[in-house]
Image (cartoon, rainbow, N blue to C red):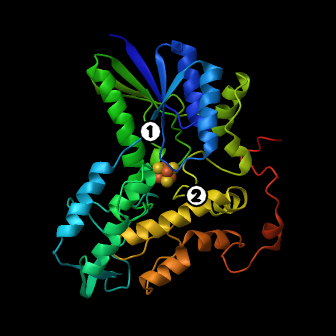
Amino acid sequence: MSIIHVVSCSTGKDSVATLLLAAGRFGTERVRGILCDTGNEHEYVFEHRLYLERATGVRIDILTANFDEEIAGKRRYIARDVRTRREYATEPVFDAAGEPVLKRDGRGNIVLNKKGTPVQKTIKVGGGKRVRWTNKAKRRALAVLQPSGNPFLDLCMWKGRFPSRKAQFCTEHLKRNMAVEYQLALIEQGHTVVSWQGVRRDESLNRRDAKQFERVDRNFFIYRPLVEWNVARVFKIAEDKNIEPNPLYKCGMGRVGCMPCINASKDEIHQIGIRFPEHIAKVAEWERLVGLASKRNAATFMHKSSGKGLNNQQIVAASNIHAVVEWAKTTRGGKQFSLLTALEEPTSCASSYGLCE
Ligand code: SF4
């Protein structure tokens, strides 16, 4: 059996550069692109996938997760649930000198957050409150908890919440698991798989130590050809081959991913609010449904407010997607409304990569 080069292709700049490198080196027969359809993609992503298939000759398969079984299991769980548990508030711990006490793991090492900053130790305070499904909450959740066929929505209905930076389960369930399953199927057919990933070390702290090459198993390898590249070089390879970038870059999006992504910047949210209000309306409807399917009768897509001292309905009022879009219109700090922002026309090019210059 042959070696298959599988390129994760979101249709964003890094994955397109990776696809071009793979096709240039091994030809279109031995290279396959995969695009995970999260159910929260902009339509430009699918248009660009077709364009890329035509322009490069590489087949790009769409992978879609399905949560029908998980939702059926959750329905059974809610209907039967009679457990009670307690949920506690926490507060940070300081030493006698008033210095923060740092959190340590089981081996005594200081725990770091994603930015590499030490995490402060916290302790439980108060007696906590009982958390369980009331009969009213059960009726409310069971009335809406049905598979919709949209992977992003179904995942959140199953989990009873939206993903967050600390619990980014969307990437795992909608992308990573799908890509792994696809590649394992090829290995089971007897192929050797090289997984090409368009990761750059200068993208984020999490990626600063990304390895260029890894051997996962006897017939499964990972190759990251862009680890030392910068953004300019990534765009240049596409330009040299006359490949257009995804139109989303010209709409003020810093990256191609979910529309919106839970990690979208304030400016991206602002741009989405202006240019793609239908995607904001979609998220608002998802907030309603996931809220109904959750134990607390509340869920927000973004997590703008820390929620400290607020009840569920106050958190929803502060952080629902329409409130976040309004906040994104404000200048730094979020209090003052920017006149310039309010007057901005959606027709202007706002690419953070200067593509139209
Ligand atoms: S991290 Fe953002 S782009 Fe990735 S799956 Fe989650 S919402 Fe989508």
How many labels were placed on the picture? Answer: 2
Q: Position of residue 139 (x, y in %)?
A: 30, 74
Q: Which label is found at residue 264?
A: 2
For the C terminus, the image quarter is top right
Looking at this view, is 252 or 145 the one in front? 145
Element type at marker 2? loop
In the image as oriented, which residue stretches furthest toward the bottom? Answer: 126
The nearer-to-camera label among 2 and 1 is 2
Q: Position of residue 302 (x, y in %)?
A: 51, 66
Label 2 beta carbon less than 8 Å to ligand 1: yes
The numbered mark, 2 or 1, whose residue comes first in the sequence reads 1
For the N terminus, the image quarter is top left
Q: Position of residue 128 (x, y in %)?
A: 25, 85
Q: Amino acid at mark 2?
A: Ala
Q: Marks 2 and 1: CB-CB under 8 Å?
A: no
Say if 132 sits above or below 245 in the image. Answer: below
Q: Which label is found at residue 210?
A: 1
**Horizontal relation, residue 194 to residue 348: left or right:** left
Q: Amino acid at mark 1?
A: Ala
